[in-house]
Image (cartoon, helix red, strand yellow):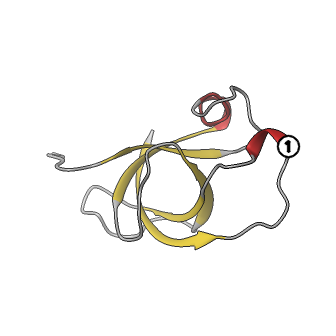
Amino acid sequence: MYLARVIGTVVATRKADNMQGLKLLVVEPCDKDRQPCGEPHVAVDAAQAGEGDLVSCVGSREAALAVEPSFVPVDAAIIGIVDHADIV
């Protein structure tokens, strides 16, 4: 699991059949100081996030299981919107 900031949206006129209705967002991973620390990438939104939100994301198999129907063909998923985080 990692923190990221939503920095954009993706519009796809065609998607895999089991991904119809799923929102795709561009996220940029953040470090503990909430500064960008990785390459922006696309994540499926399972938490109804919006641009500028700090979100928690998962990757790999966990991402594929994060939305219904289970096991959609994705590499990253937004699973929560972060309200507050204390990181030491």
What is the quadrant of the N terminus in the image?
top left
Q: Quadrant of residue 71?
A: top right
Q: Is residue 23 left or right of residue 51?
A: right
Q: Is residue 76 above or below residue 62?
A: below
Q: Is residue 66 left or right of residue 83?
A: right
Residue bearing the label numbered 1: 17
Q: Position of residue 85 (x, y in %)?
A: 18, 47
Type of residue at label 1?
Asp
Give the number of callouts.
1
Q: Position of residue 17 (x, y in %)?
A: 85, 43
Tell me what residue is drawn at x 27 percent, y 55 percent: 32
Tell me what residue is drawn at x 69 percent, y 28 percent: 69
Q: Quadrant of residue 67?
A: top right
Could you tell me which secondary element the residue under label 1 belongs to? helix
Q: Is residue 26 left or right of residue 48?
A: right
What is the quadrant of the C terminus in the image?
top left
Name the residue furthest front: 21
Q: Position of residue 25 (x, y in %)?
A: 56, 62
- Closest to the observer, 43 or 37: 43
Q: Position of residue 11 (x, y in %)?
A: 69, 70
- Closest to the observer, 69 or 8: 69
Mark 1 neighbour density, 10 Å: few (under 14) some (14–19) many (20 or more): few
Tell me what residue is drawn at x 81 percent, y 67 percent: 13
